[in-house]
Amino acid sequence: MLIDSHAHLDSERYAEDRVAMLERARAAGVEMILAVGIGDGPETMHAALDLSRQHAGDARLPRIVVSVGVHPQEAAQADAAALDKLNDLAAAPEVVAIGEIGLDYYHADNPTPAVQQRAFAQQMEIAAAHKLPILIHCRPADGDDRAWEDTLTMLETHWRPTSLGGVLHCFTGTWEQAQRAMEMGFLISFAGNVSFPKAQALRDVAAQVPLDRLLVETDAPFLAPMPHRGKRNESAWVRLVAETLAAVRGVSVEQIAAATTENFRKRML
């Protein structure tokens, strides 16, 4: 069995066939999905939780657990009302993490680094108060590693003392950056882009991450793995990510599935 550790199940791209998509995931051996609760911004960060409750107990579908958070691209909206809402949602039993949160310096029109860093620190404070792990989004500008350095420095300052750990979602960094995160108790999660032809450097990192620190995810509906690249992604295809990691590491897909499922259950639930 597999766990998709990061999917945007509330996306409007599933509006017409969400239940069928979830049934396909269950048929593919996906027993659980972490539905990332960022919505289209703070006003809709509750949507993933609503979805989890709507489908709770349906044996045809994977179990849906939830995160809540303000994405760094919406950091300017992380005002007192948004943070109060996040704090309230974090108390729900279905919520197992805060996120995805972090830093995104990729787009020039994103909030300034200072605004993103403030929202990041505030959300780490809420996560610590609820004793929840965090899901980290880090996307640097092309050719500039400042987002990684700022993210890891902030984690070392604000998060390491909590010993709560979390996940570096859709990891795209270097082995050295992965090591720094793992030293703070983080899991390293790989998405469909690890299967892309030009992603050999990322596969080289994936080959080195200890088996007890790995997770797999789809980041659906984004980043569909090969051979579906360019299509709408879905949780059933997390098996293709697991197959890529198995090939890279010279082990069976069953070993990857068992290890990543155990890692998620042990560290995130």
Image (spheres, grey):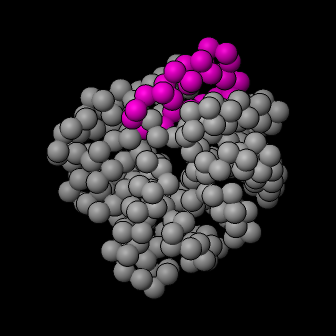
Q: Which residues are magenta?
A: 66-94
> Residue drawn at (60%, 35%), measured in percent from left and top?
127
> Residue drawn at (74%, 69%), measured in percent from left and top?
176
Q: Is residue 213 left or right of residue 55?
A: right
Quadrant position of residue 11 = top left
From where the camera sits, is residue 214 visible? yes
Q: Is residue 214 left or right of residue 101?
A: left
Question: Residue 24, percent across and down?
Answer: 23, 52
Q: Please say whether residue 89 is one of the residues in the magenta stretch.
A: yes
Exactly how many numbered labels are in the figure? 0
* Furthest residue in direction bottom, as rendered: 250
Closest to the observer, 76 or 256:
256
Quadrant position of residue 9 = top left
> Residue drawn at (82%, 33%), measured in percent from left and top?
114
Quadrant position of residue 265 = bottom left
From where the camera sits, is residue 73 visible? no
Closest to the observer, 163 or 261:
163
Question: Residue 6, percent across and down?
Answer: 46, 48
> Residue drawn at (46%, 40%), measured in percent from left and top?
96
Q: Is residue 121 above or below residue 255?
A: above
Q: Is residue 12 above or below residue 224?
A: above
Closest to the observer, 76 or 134:
134
Q: Please say whether residue 62 is one of the residues in the magenta stretch.
A: no
Question: Residue 4, percent across and down?
Answer: 40, 54
